[in-house]
Amino acid sequence: MHIDVGKDFYPRLANRDRRQGDGKHNAGQFRVKYLSHMDNPEFWAHDAESVTFDFKNVDKIGPSFANEAFAYFTKYAEPKLIKSRIKFVNISEVDRIIIEEEIDSGYCDRK
């Protein structure tokens, strides 16, 4: 699966959930829309298809968005496995570092 995030979802990835910022286009919605099939331990226990997110039309990603959207899966798998199943193309080095730092640090649920 290959997704143009900026066109299909939103170009500014900053809101963790509906309570942050304007609450729209938040990481929880993103995770449900694109990654819900990964939200179970069975997915991570077996070989599975990866998803590729194209960031060519993304202007920004914030750490709280990256944590909620991607690091969320550290409850099921090690960071190395997550980074092998969720891929990013056409992404700036800064945005890649933000995402990888959040995945490597684990999920911080601030509910």
Image (spheres, rainbow, N blue to C red):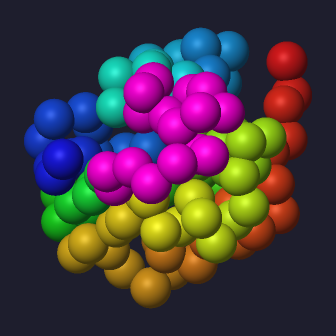
Vertical side of 40 occupied by 85: above or below: below
Residue in the foreground of this view, choosing between 97 and 31 = 31
| 74 versus 97 height, above or below | above
Q: Can the viewer see residue 52 in this picture?
A: yes
Residue farthest front in this picture: 46
Where does the image place residue 56, in percent across and percent down from the top left?
Answer: 18, 65
Q: Position of residue 79 (x, y in %)?
A: 69, 65
Question: Any magenta on residue 40?
Answer: yes
Q: In which quarter of the image is residue 9?
A: top left
Q: Nearer the viewer, residue 85 or 61?
A: 85
Total residue callouts:
0
Q: What stretch is highlighted in magenta?
A: 35-50
> Could you say which quadrant of the image residue 32 lies in?
top left
- Residue positioned 45% across, 54% down in the render: 47
Q: In this view, does 31 lie to the left or right of 49?
A: right
User: Which residue is pictured at 34% across the width and 32% down the height?
Assistant: 34
The answer to which quarter of the image holds residue 37 is top left
The x and y percentages for residue 11 are 28, 46
- In this view of the protein, can residue 64 be seen by the observer? no
User: Given the current orientation, which residue lies at the most extreme bottom position?
Assistant: 93
Q: Quadrant of the C terminus?
A: top right
Q: Where is residue 19 in the image (x, y as percent from the top left)?
A: 68, 15
Left or right: residue 82 compared with residue 93: right
* Image position of 110 with respect to 43: above or below: above
